[in-house]
Image (tube, rainbow, N blue to C red):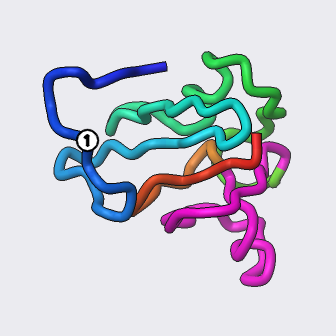
């Protein structure tokens, strides 16, 4: 979990200039920061979020996770267009805005 005390809060719908993005866990009110060199999966696992890692390349869908807000930049090959409307694969997906998970 990360807090940024030294800079003003950026609106959730504006991408970070450095390529990082946030994952907000709506029910627990926790916001995680995914740095450019990290995967969302690694950050979720480090925070104790129960996500099942699989192939780690976006090919199997084992880690596919529901989201309820945000603009994911899908990089997987396993989810259908319909599934991508509500799920993302955190092993490879980045985001253009904050991703909100129903957790």
Q: Any magenta on residue 84? A: yes
* Identity of the residue drawn at 56% across and 42% down: 24
Mark 1 lies on a secondary structure that is loop
Q: Main secondary structure of the magenta part?
A: loop
Nearest the viewer among 7 and 46 is 7
Residue 50 image point, x, y percent: 82, 27
Nearest the viewer among 96 and 75 is 96
Q: Any magenta on residue 82? A: yes
Examine the rendered structure and indicate whether residue 37 appears above or below residue 9: above
Residue 30 image point, x, y percent: 57, 29
Examine the rendered structure and indicate whether residue 77 appears above or below residue 36: below
Would residue 35 be found to the left or right of residue 101 on screen?
Answer: left
* Identity of the residue drawn at 42% across and 32% down: 33
Please state the extent of the stretch shown in magenta in the rendering.
Answer: 62-89
Nearest the viewer among 69 and 45 is 69
Examine the rendered structure and indicate whether residue 94 appears above or below residue 71: above
Examine the rendered structure and indicate whether residue 13 appears above or below residue 103: below
Residue 65 image point, x, y percent: 77, 50
Quarter of the image holding residue 52?
Answer: top right
Quarter of the image holding residue 88?
Answer: bottom right
* Crowding at mark 1 (Cα within 10 Å: few <14, some 14-19, many 20+): few
Residue marked by disc 1:
9
């Amino acid at each position: 979990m990360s807090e940024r005390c030294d800079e003003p809060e950026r609106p959730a719908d504006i991408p970070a200039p450095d390529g990082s993005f946030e994952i907000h866990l709506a029910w627990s009110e926790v916001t995680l920061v995914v740095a450019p060199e990290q995967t969302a999966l690694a950050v979720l696992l480090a925070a104790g979020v129960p996500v099942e890692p699989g192939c780690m390349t976006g090919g199997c869908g084992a880690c596919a996770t529901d989201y309820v807000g945000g603009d994911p930049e899908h990089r997987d090959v396993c989810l259908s267009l319909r599934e991508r409307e509500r799920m993302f694969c955190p092993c490879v997906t980045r985001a253009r805005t904050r991703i909100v998970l129903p957790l």
